[in-house]
Image (spheres, rainbow, N blue to C red):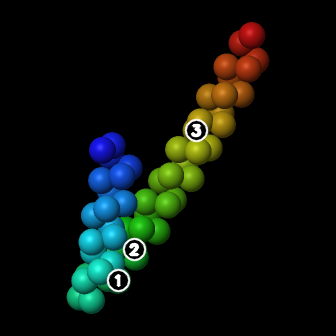
Amino acid sequence: MNIVDNIKNKIDQLKKDDEKMYVGIQFETQFNEKMNELDLLEQEINKVLQHKD
């Protein structure tokens, strides 16, 4: 398992617990924001790689 899957699983565990659900949702929001940042980073890297050819 990679780190992304580990984080998703832990967030899912939090969301199943009534007392921790709110925190799980907050972490899920943060996680999704970071994933979007990684997607943008990948796009920028791809642009540089394409221009290098």
Circle on res. 41: 3
Q: Earlier in the sequence, mark 3 or mark 1?
A: 1
The amino acid type of the residue labelled 3 equals Leu
Query: Does residue 23 appear anywhere in the picture?
Result: no
What count of labels does the image hold? 3
Q: Is residue 33 above or below residue 20?
A: above
Q: Which residue is mark 1?
A: 22
Residue at 38% across, 50% down: 4
The image position of residue 26, as x and y in percent, is: 39, 74
Circle on res. 9: none
Q: Which residue is mark 2?
A: 26
The outermost residue toward the top is 53
Q: Earlier in the sequence, mark 3 or mark 2?
A: 2
Is residue 38 found left or right of 22 in the rendered image?
right
The outermost residue toward the bottom is 18
The amino acid type of the residue labelled 2 equals Gln
Q: Residues within 10 Å of mark 2 (few under 14, many from 20)?
A: few
The image position of residue 29, as x and y in percent, is: 46, 68
Question: Of helix, strand and loop, which one carries label 3?
Answer: helix
Q: Is residue 39 above or below residue 27?
A: above
Q: Is residue 45 above or below residue 30?
A: above
Splitting the image into 4 quarters, where does residue 22 fall? bottom left
How far is mark 1 from mark 2, CA to CA?
6 Å
Query: Does residue 43 appear anywhere in the picture?
Result: yes
The amino acid type of the residue labelled 1 equals Tyr
How far is mark 3 from mark 2, CA to CA?
23 Å
The image position of residue 17, as x and y in percent, is: 25, 83
How far is mark 3 from mark 1, CA to CA?
29 Å
The image position of residue 9, as x and y in percent, is: 31, 62
The outermost residue toward the front is 1
* Tag 1 near tag 2, CB within 8 Å: yes
